[in-house]
Structures are given as C-alpha cells and as structure tokens.
Amino acid sequence: MPAMFIRIKAKTSKKESDLFRKSVQIVESFREMGKVKQRIVKHIGVAHSEQQLQELKELATSVQIALENENELSLFNPEDLTKDILVPKEDTTANCSYGDEDYQVDMRELNEEARVITGIHDVYGSLFDELKLDSIFTSDNSENKKAKGETTVDKPLSPTALKKLIDNFKNIVLARIAQPDSKSASVDMLSNNFGVSLDLSAVYRMMDKIDDKAIEKLNTLAYNTTKKLFNDKIDAIFFDATTLYFESFTEDEGEDAIRKNGYSKDLKFNQPQVVLALMVTKEGLPIGYEAFSGDTFDGHTLIPSLKVLRDKYNIDNVVYVADSGMFNKNNLEELENLEADNFNYIVGARIKNLSKEIKAKIVDMSNYRELNSEIKVATFTLDNGRKLIVSHSKKRAKKDYNDRMKGVEKLKKRLESSKSVKAQLSNQGYNRYIQLEESKSSCDMNITINEAKIEADVIWDGLKGLVVNADSKMSQEEVLAQYNNLWQVEESFRITKHDLKIRPIYHFKPSRVRAHLAISFGAYMLTRYLEYRVRVQYKKLSPKRIKNLLLGVQTSIVVSQEKKIKYALPSNMKVETKRIYTLMGVKTKTVPYIIEKF
C-alpha cells in the first residue's frame, strides 16, 4: 500500500497576506513511470487559527489510521440497506443494462409508490459502520473465554441471525436520532418514513441481547474512539449526573431494581426514575456512562464512575471536572484517596457554606490578583489542605446583582397583592429575604423585606469557588479554563433529554431499561461525533440543524406500469447538506435512476 502522510498546505492571498489559512490533507506517495508522485486521498479541512489547525491535524491522524487499516481508501462505505429502494440495483453509469428508451417515459402515467427519507441512513448509517457499533454484539471466541477462566461458552448466533440483530439495533439507534419515540412508534415511523420494516418483537429480542457485556463494550468503544481522535491523550473528563423519569408510578423490587423514587431534577417526585452519570471531553465527545437506581444521590455516583474508568482503562494524569453538586465531604475524602493513582479533580465549591475564617478571606478583595480587566483570582488553603481557587468576575457580578433585584421586585409585588403569612413563608429562592415583624397597631405580624440581608448578599456577587486536590500543579488559569468547559456536559444532557428524548422511559424490566439507555447512548455517540467532524472540517452546526438537513434528503419512488419499471427521483440538496456528505465521504445520488424492471 502506498505510504500516507498528513500535509499542511498554506493558502496565501495577495490582498490579505497576513490571513491565517492552512489546508490539512491526507496525501499518499506513489510511483508512476519511475517517478515518485503524490495525490490527495482525503481533504480534511481548512484552518483559520492555530486551534483549528490542531483540531484538524488530530482528526487527520485518526482518519489516516482508519484508512491504513481499510482495504479501500474510502473511510466510509455507502449504507447497504435491506430495502433496495434506497440503493439502485444497477449502477447505470458503469454498465449498459438500461438503454435510453427505458428513461423515455410519459410523466402523466407515472405513479408515486413511496417517498422515503434517505439522509439519516446515508450519513449516520455510514458513521455507525465506521465506528463499528455493531461490535457490541460480537462474542468472545472459545480460546479467549478459556484464557479468562470461563468454563462456559455461549452458543454463537448464526451469521443470518447476527446480521438481523445488528440491523435492528442500527435502525432503532438511527430512529432515536431522526424522531425519538417509544420502540413501537419507532417501528411505525421507520416503516412509514424510511422504507425500513422491523418486527417489534424482534426489536425487543434485540434489546434483551444488550446485556452487561454489550454495555461494557459500548463504553469501551466510546472511550477508545474519543481517545483516538486526540492522539490517545485525554487531559480532562467532565462529569455530571441527572435523573430520568418513567411513564410509570411503580417502583422495581429485588436486587436488580433500577426504577426507584428519589430526588427528581424534573420535579416528578411521585414517579420512579433512574440516575444517569455521563462523562464527556471538553468538546462534548462521549467517554462513557453509568446507570444507577433512582434512589441514588447523584453526588454518590462520582466515585463509582471514576473507579470504573480507572479499572477499565488504567487512566492516569486526568483531571476530572464536576459541578458543586458533587461537593460533599465523602466524595472529596474518596478523591484524596485516589490521588495516589494520579487522579486530579476540579469541583465547584459552595463557598457560603465554608468556615467563617475562610469566608472572611474570600470577600476581602485585597487577597486577589488581576488576571485581566474583567477577572480577579485568589487561592486559599482549606483546613484539610485542599486548595480553594476563587474567581471574581465583573460580568458575573453584574448578572448576579440584576437577577437578585428582579427577584426582589417580583417578591415586593407579590407581598403587595397578598398579605397572607402562610402563603409567603418559605426559605426558597428570594423568599429568604422575607422577615416577620410585630405590628405596632395590632397583635398581627407584618411581612417585610429584610434589606440588610440583601445588602449582605451583594458582597458575594461575581464570586465562584473551585476546590482542587492539595498537590495540584495546575495554575489558576488552567483550573478556571477547565471548569469553564463544564457547560459541555450540561449541553450533552440537553441533547440526550431533548434532542434524543431519552425520557420518559416506557420499559419496566430492569434489563430493558438498561438496553434503552445503551441505545440512547449509541445515538448520542453518533450525534456528537458527526457534530464534531462537521465543526472541525466545515463549520459549527448544531445536532438539531444537522438532523433537519439530513431529514430533508428524500427519494421518491415512482412506477411506470406501462414500461414495468421502478424509478428513483432523489430530492434536491442544500449546500450545507452536500458539504456534510462530501466531508463524510458518502456518495450523493442527484439524478434519477432505475431501481428495477418488474
């Protein structure tokens, strides 16, 4: 095979000589008539900054490895669906099976047989294949099992049964990206809109095959795929947990129970839930996930998840970043115990709950140094030796103040409209500024606003605290930069909850609940990887925008009863859609073609 390498080619402009514009390409050398020549195998993208250049180079390295391990140069193979309406049986550009007379037809006698969406399967289907998501169902061979000390060997599925299992998994994952719904509704939607026929009972049998081993393989695949994108180096893992509710009011029982009532972030306290812990990179790319029973406090999910990662992947020198919900005594004590294994952490701190001595230092601005015109920062040592890094942001202070004053104004208006003590007594939100005073004219109690308490809170505006391990070597700037990327995990949960509609969960059996989470995580993997590649190689497009563009790629199937020919009429593509197809290496069908004669 010819040698491949990554080439960085600067693109200059006479009008703008200082313009940063560098093209990243995968190139191969070959010999022709005794001379060594080069040709472009794949164009990765054009960088307009050093950061973009680094991202493109890392992606190019990953693509180069994939290309070198493939028999063909193309990174993606076109999706070969079981439905022949999506792919022509004959390539009319390569043979003469059909003559010009076959395309000469009276439009008035054509009937539309179906109209199917092809974009989702074309692009996301190809990405599914390239990431080898089907590998979660491949069984260990007998030799490997014996080497592991296992005495029993599962009877392997026949090639036909395995292919059917993978096809069902693939189509259900793609259905969750295209139009997430219940499994029954997904089967109907695939049939009506995508020309894919699935048997619902077969889908449930497929879910029963997504056992603990398959889920472990899925997590391993996510971790290794993400790691490969960054030259086998992940410097920070962002962690958070959320709750997912069920369309049910009954809890599980038994040792395998997962549907349990608990503190619901969706405020559905009368419905059972499951706790989902998600780990991603600063780009939002998946590293792994863990599921816990619904009665698990999300702050207690951190250590089990970190231990799983450590044991599985032998990770060291990685910074784990989590929000203040993880700030509790037990977690931090366990994190310190993990420092011997090179675990570092950045955890949001609840600075108002610290000791009086530390709080006095925090609000004293003379302890801070300026990072820039907007931000000041200080480092304090807590009683247990841990470091507390506190930043003060003018922008954040202004927002905190304005939010408080808006809340107080609403509170005053509510007090004017209702003097009922019972209706106002609460320590939630801005109600904490309410106080009771004895009336001078009667035995009643008056409700007033505690202005002194409002003023006391002003000194905390703009302050944000972060706890790091005692021997952390990270600078203040590095700590703040890593924590500021935590929004990626928050956006990841928004994608899983809203774009992929991972909840409500309709399943009852614990095994199928876990299978549903695995299917949703598979959809999340595809969504995030495609979003990342589109951003790095083209421009930033949201997952929702990408999905809508691909949903617009459709094919009409029309039939000529006179000629007994079935034709496919591809829809027109937007410029952005064509670019997605091109950068993902997926061929486009833009002209009508014949599917078959009958």
Image (spheres, rainbow, N blue to C red):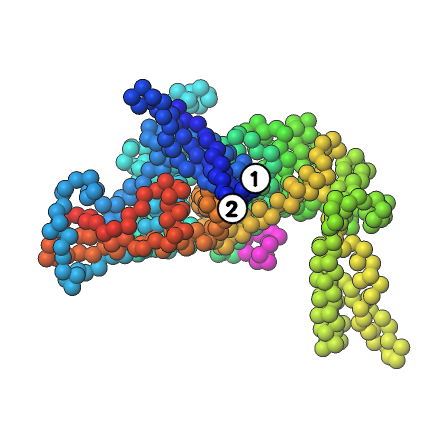
Which sits earlier in the primary sequence, circle 1 or circle 2?
2
101 left or right of 156 in image: left
* 1 and 2 marks in contact (CB < 8 Å): no
Picture quadrant where residue 474 is located:
top right
**Disc 2 secondary structure class:** loop
Residue reaching furthest to the right: 440
Q: Quadrant of the N terminus?
A: top left
On whether residue 27 falls in the magenta region, the answer is no
**Disc 1 secondary structure class:** helix
- Name the one closer to the observer, 48 or 232: 48
Residue at image x 35%, y 50%? 119
Please name the amino acid that badge 2 sits on: Lys
Q: Main secondary structure of the magenta part?
A: loop
Residue 485, placed above or below residue 150: below
- Residue 308 x/y as whole percent: 57, 33
- Residue 28 x/y as whole percent: 39, 27
- Residue 100 x/y as whole percent: 13, 49
Q: Residue 15 has which mark?
A: 2
415 left or right of 203 in image: right
334 left or right of 294 in image: right
Please name the amino acid that badge 1 sits on: Gln
Residue at image x 51%, y 46%? 15
Residue at image x 23%, y 45%? 88
All told, the count of numbered labels is: 2
- Which residues are drawn in magenta? 258-272
- Residue 526 x/y as whole percent: 44, 43
Residue under circle 1?
51
